Amino acid sequence: MADTYSVELAHVLRELGSDPDDGLTQVQAAHRLASTGLNVLRAQPPVLRWRKVLAQFQDPLIYLLLAAIVVSGGAWWVEGAAGWPIDAVVIAVIVVLNAVLGYSQEAKAERAVAALQRMTEVHATVRRDGRTVDVPVDEIVPGELLVLSEGDSVGADARLVEANSLQVAEAALTGESTAVSKAPATLSTDLPLGDRTNSVYRGTAVTQGTGRAVVIGTAMDTEMGRIATLLESAVRGPTPLEREIAFIGRFLGMAVVVIAVVVMGTVWLVSGVETIGDAVDVLLLGVSLAVAAVPEGLPAVLSVVLSVGVRRMASRDAIVKNLSSVETLGSASVICSDKTGTLTRNEMTVQRIVTASGDARVTGVGYRPEGEVVIGDAGVGAAADADREALRAEATVLLAGGSLTSDSELAQEDGEWSVRGDPTEAAFLVAERKMGLTARRERRFTRVGEAPFTSVRKRMSTVQLDHEHHDTPVLVTKGAPDVVLARCTRYRRGQRVLELDATMRARFLGDVERLSGEGMRTIGVAYRPLGDATAVAGAAYPDGGSVPAEVVAELENELVWVGTVGMTDPAREDVGEAVREAQRAGVRVVMITGDHPTTALRIAQDLDIAGPGGTSVTGAELDRLDEEGLHRAVTEVDVFARVSPEHKLRIVDALQRDGQVVAMTGDGVNDAPALKSADIGVAMGISGTEVTKEAGEMILRDDNFSTIVAAIRQGRVIFANIRKFLRYLLSSNTGEVMTVFLGVALASLIGLDVATGDGVILPLLATQILWINLVTDLAPALALGVDPETDDVMGRAPRRSDERVVDARMWFGILAVGLVMALVTLLSIDIFLPGGLVEGSDDLSVARTAGFTTLVLAQLFNVLNSRSQTRTAFSGLWTNRWLWAAIVLGLCAQVAVVHVPILQTAFGTAALDVRHWLTCVLLASCVLWFDELVKLGQRRHDRRREPGRRPARRGTGWGHVRHA
């Protein structure tokens, strides 16, 4: 429907066949989904399969191989076309096999990314069959009745049916930086998008209030769909890890081309090339060397390894939305965590009630309304009968007031009690039921207006009509005790209302401090009788509308203080251990909460986040700090309390300026800027809003802090595995290059020149080099990519953001192992050839096959080396079954190429006897023993250099700071 903002709402609903209260039926929704399709924006058309296959051949190295096939086939034709063009056929088969493997790995990575997207799909709340249900945004249909609340991401274009203090951030569509107030009234025609205040649009976010809206457009029929072509043109740039691996590939490519040219020139000069066949052999050697030396499968292997790691994280309830975020997890140095629901279980239970007449204790835990409110027992101090009755009256008003300012629902299904909404509000509903007040409260009061809670206001108020007192309106407020108490001028004692003097105000604040010191979360409740309807701007009740939120907010003064409740939210059992594990890994943990500073500090000390002498800093104190003071605060303090989302953003920015890599948790809509600014935004999957889930790079399905630490561990394991397969591929390929180069340079020393005679000196044939590349590169590299944790990844400091993936120490190991690999390969050739350093008796074919086999076996031994740069290969030797499968597969393939006649013809091999095989195995194992000696020396060096590594420090305390 076009221009629905200027059409009467009743007409819009009639045209869409939607009910303003019950929405659509499930049957209607199913039929409309079948006819309109999924509510998804048009994406770029998928690449056709044949194009993906063709893309496997679009690589400069593959072009070289294709040219080599043409040259080899041409030479075979010129020389008489006798028999089969073996070299051309073998190279062609290897090119095809490489393409098949590359295609299969890319397909596997694409499937993993698709599965990741399904795990992070966004949901919307709608009305169907008169019930409120959650459905995937993709399944929203025209005529759907959306139920909107703070933090929701709007899933389709819709016309408002009702709105209560509703504000929507529309910057994604209009560029307007401030949220737009919404109301359902019909508007005039020809209004720009930003002025259509009775409509909400896909891709925008609800920042405040609640509302309902009927869907008028989905998918490409939305305002966002009209600019979908701009979205289609957006291309994600490479991540730092991808850029570095691409750089390594380019560097190796240029280096190997130079080496290949030098090798070909050397062979040409030393061997005296005389025939076309000799020239082709030299050319094929150079091309094969260039192709084998560059690990062209690195991008595919990287994608698969990241995908597998992300799946492992998802199995631990950490959903990483982008593969690139895995890099950052391994570098995280600070976790800024909320308290409620992340460090604690988010199961609020009212345990204490403190009013002017004393304390009351509430028994029972959890959401099951079983227990009672114990008034004046010995455990909370004896009270006279009059005081006991006064306390009971105050407790009644307190719990009823907290329930009247609640948007949560407490329901029982199949004998189990569950909560929909905020757990803090639900705690009032549970305590009220324990006191038997619910039924009367629901009959007595009707809400006619509200000013919602925000992180800035730190309070919520509602206007209720009291049907037991001639529908007299009353304002009820709950929120942070200090905030609410500051707006009170009187207090309630029993049935009386008295003036609030400085002594009583100090006493009530002391009650709050006392409860907070016991680790309780405190909520204050107050009220204000409003007289008749004229006291609230002449609004009519209950049929004439509701009191505007701005009017309600203006009435939040001259309140009557009732009291404070103390709630407990026990810490999660595994959080303390997770905090200590993070600190052992050099990751500092900072608590950032809107709770009372005393409560926050007490829980932080219980969890070892803050030390015994630690302190906290409040949002108000942060506001008074200049840049130097803020820097000191974020480096010295571990607990920030009574903070707003703006404070969170300042803390993140200050930590990042200090060089820290910050992970920030969030659940509310106003946390989205801080999550986006942080290096790793962590959204809560249970309590988090859809906006924060979209803003974060990672979603916790269980809202558990321990899951963040587990994800950091897995991120470090993934990065360690990337280094493992890079170490393996680069050292093995270096060994191949050095074998050919040194084999030509040292041909006379090992007897290769004599054995070759008038032919071209080739320590390995071109087809043998390509075989090694095919057999020993991909499978072992993938197996290393899924290797379980070998080194203690949480026993070292976070990786610096500027630290190279392949550092100088790793390059030294790569070159050293590659040299040893080349030397033992050439030694095996020398042992079996007549002449040279060691006198042998076999012909060139056998000796070359022995060298070929030694190099393959050395690379298989090198797989075991590459699992750790310092730990012995024999530690956890059997923990990776995929690694052993790759080794066995490579060994079986090598036995086949040596002993199967058709493969002997194709790859120029000869059968080896037991003596040959034993010699090859012993020489190849030298790669393992050499690396073990290097690791032993490295471990001794590291122990002398770092006798003990200190864990991440906690804040040192809050000293004198300079204020702005």
Image (cartoon, grey):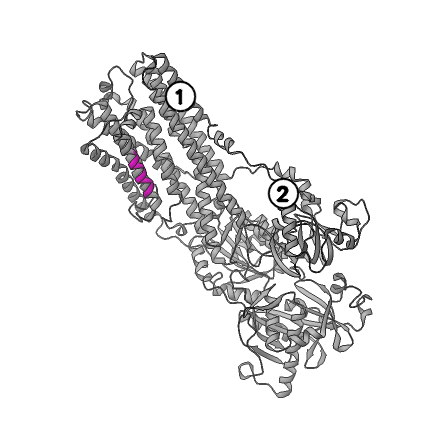
Type of residue at label 2? Leu
- Residue 221 appears at what percent x and percent y? 69, 43
Q: Residue at point 24% right, 20% down?
A: 748
Residue on which the image places disc 2: 41
Whole-number angstrom distance, CA of label 2 to CA of label 1: 46 Å
- Residue 919 appears at what percent x and percent y? 21, 33
Q: Which image quadrant: the C terminus?
A: bottom right
Asked if the stretch drawn in magenta spans residue 548, the answer is no
Asked if the stretch drawn in magenta spans residue 890, the answer is yes
- The magenta span reads 884-893
Comparing 536 with 631, the one in front is 536
Label 1 crowd (10 A; few <14 / some 14-19 / many >=20): many
Asked which secondary structure carries label 2, the reply is loop
- Residue 25 appears at what percent x and percent y? 66, 57
Q: Residue at point 63% right, 66% down?
A: 480
Asked which secondary structure carries label 1, the reply is helix
User: Seen in the image, is 387 located left or right of residue 293?
Assistant: right
Q: Earlier in the sequence, mark 2 or mark 1?
A: 2
Asked if residue 763 is positioned above or below residue 871 in the image, the reply reads above
Indicate which disc residue 69 carries: 1
Asked if residue 874 is positioned above or below residue 370 in the image, the reply reads above
